[in-house]
Structures are given as C-alpha cells and as structure tokens.
Image (cartoon, helix red, strand yellow):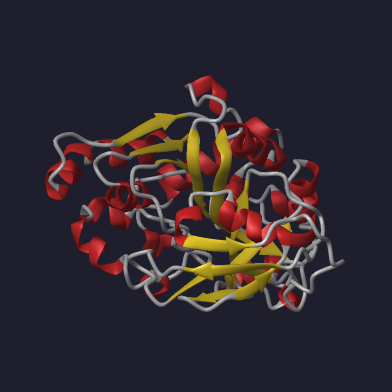
Amino acid sequence: MTDAALSESVQNYYGEVLKSSQDLKTSACCTLDAMPGHLRPFLADLHPEVVARFYGCGSPLPPALEGRTVLDLGCGSGRDCYLLSRLVGESGRVIGVDMTQAQLDVARRHCDWHAERYGYACSNVEFLQGRIEDLASIGIADNSIDVVVSNCVINLSPDKKQVLAEVFRVLKPGGELYFSDVYADRRIPAALRQDPVLLGECLGGALYGEDFRRIMHDLGCPDVRTVKGNPITLGDPEVLAKIGMVNFRSVTVRAFKMPLEDRCEDFGQVAVYKGTLPESPHFFDLDDHHHFETGRPLRVCGNTADMLGMSRYAEHFEIWGDKSTHFGLFDCAPPNKSLSVESGAACC
C-alpha cells in the first residue's frame, strides 16, 4: 500500500468509521482519569461535540505555556487545541493541523463558542488542513513555534522520520516537543502495518521503541526523555487475533531543540526548582527519573541542566555551576533507556 493509500485509510477511519470515542476497539485512547488534576476543570468548558470526537492517548500538555505559540499535530476535533487556548492565554496562539476534513469541520465550527466561553475578544486558535509531514506547504515557518504537541497521531503517519524532521525545523531554538504516542516492543510485520483497523486503532503504525530512539538521534536529538507511560489493553477479539503477540505502551515523551550530548556527562551542576509554576507549587517532574522538589537542590547532568536552563523553564529554576570542569559520566539513566515494555519507562 502506498503512503497516499495509507493516509486515505486513516482519513476514512477517523472521518467516517468512528463516530465517537466509544467506537474505538482498544485502550490506545486513555480514559479521562489520565487527565492531570489541574486540567480537569477546563473540560467543563469544552463543547460536547469536540469532546465526543476526541481520539487521543494521553494528555500531552506541558506547563509554562502562557503567551506561547503552540502547534498541535493531528489536532482532530480540537479538544487539545481548546485546552491549550486556555493555557496560552489570550496573548498566546494555538495552531491545529489535521488532514481529515470531517474532524476539522467539528473543530472549526466551535472557535467562536470557545472564545466567548473564555472571555477572549477573538479566538486565538487556528485550524489548518494539511499533512504533518509537510508543514511548510501550510505556511508553518522555520523557528516559529515554542512548543509542538501531538496526541496519538505520529504513529498514523507513513513517514514518521519526516514528521519529526518537520517538528525540529519549525521549533524555535530551545523549543520543546511534548507528545503522547503508541510504541511496540518489536517491529510490526508489513502486512499488519497496512491493516485498516489496526492502523486506525494506532497499533499498526506503532514504532518499535528502539527505532524511535534511532530516528531522534539521526535528527540531532540524542537525549529524549520519557515522562510517563501505560500498557495498552487489546480487549477486542479481532485485534487480539491479528496482533496479540505484540506488547504496546502509550508513552509521553519530551525532547528539546538544543545541542545535547549523547550521554549524560557530569559537570558538577545542581538545579533548584523555585516552585513558581502555578500547577506545580511543590515539585516539577522533568521526566520519569528527575523529580525536583521546590527549593531542594538536585545534582544534574549537563543535558538536564541545559534542558532546564536553555528552555522556557529557565525562569523557574536556578542552575548552579557551568561546564568548565568535567567529572566524567553522570549516572542519569532510568532502569532501561528503551521504550519497550521491559524498560519500565513510564503516557497517560
């Protein structure tokens, strides 16, 4: 099946086959209890049709977004875009991109409804139809985006490396990619990658975790951090019969557009979280193995110091020390660096 045919299959599944999230066959789309507590009150201000047509697998909405420009890849009916609209504030901007007309029709018809609900003079959300592999064709310029998010969509692309290359093209220096997706503990056989149901359920196109790591390294991002993850239940008999030998996880990861080393190196640096993020007064978790308690100094590797000190998080941290003296490797890794089931890498 060609890339065009695969894209058409995805559009048909999400535009015609699925009428609501209740039509999904697996738990690749997580329940609302996966939503962080500080975001749950905002759900009441979302239009019911937008919520009903949501098919994500997590809540990939990072903090510190006030006044920022955020791009949502595969925005669908716009649920995350409208949550982001609240988080960036009236001075911020949200751009949603999707290739499925039926989903965009739902998203677009509620722009004014949400702006009025939020008390904005006009909507700060824009929806564009296009392919996430080619953001230039819809006018997304180089170095123009503060944060890129995506919710269980990149697995649907026939060219994931090109999607990720576009992400790093449009991100500003120091910008962040923060997204949830489905990963497999092995490479999916070619025939199953083309199965319309498996593809639409975010299983057929799931990347093998190690292949994702290799793609990111090739794109100049050697240090990707796992934030959290959950196993996916294949409860549908048809799905189990086809692909029950593969273990899947939905995983949230973050990566930054900045020069980083491919190993965690020790420069004697220390980071202190100030407790200034409103939703996180007591602690901030950079990933599944960096837990910063407010006011408590924590030794960090050079990469972690840069992620905190060279990004929009810089105002919320004090970084002590520089890179003038090197002390060798820093033991900064989680139990296993892969995104496989064995890793313990913990999305929803």
Quarter of the image for the N terminus: give it: top right
Residue 155 drawn above or below residue 302: above
293 and 56: which is toward the camera: 293
| Residue at (53% x, 62% y) in the render | 318
Q: Position of residue 81 (x, y in %)?
A: 35, 46
Residue with the most extreme right position = 328
Q: Is residue 4 left or right of residue 103?
A: right
Q: Is residue 147 left or right of residue 125?
A: right
Q: Which quadrant of the figure has residue 219? A: top right
320 and 8: which is toward the camera: 320
Q: Which quadrant of the figure has residue 252? A: bottom right
Q: Position of residue 266 (x, y in %)?
A: 79, 66
| Residue at (34% x, 48% y) in the render | 66
Is residue 346 among the parts visible in the rendering?
A: no
153 and 304: which is toward the camera: 304
Is residue 284 among the parts visible in the rendering?
A: yes
Residue 46 drawn above or below residue 113: below
Residue 271 drawn above or below residue 128: below
| Residue at (27% x, 37% y) in the render | 124
Q: Is residue 194 left or right of residue 281?
A: right
Q: Is residue 291 left or right of residue 302?
A: left
Count of residue discs: 0
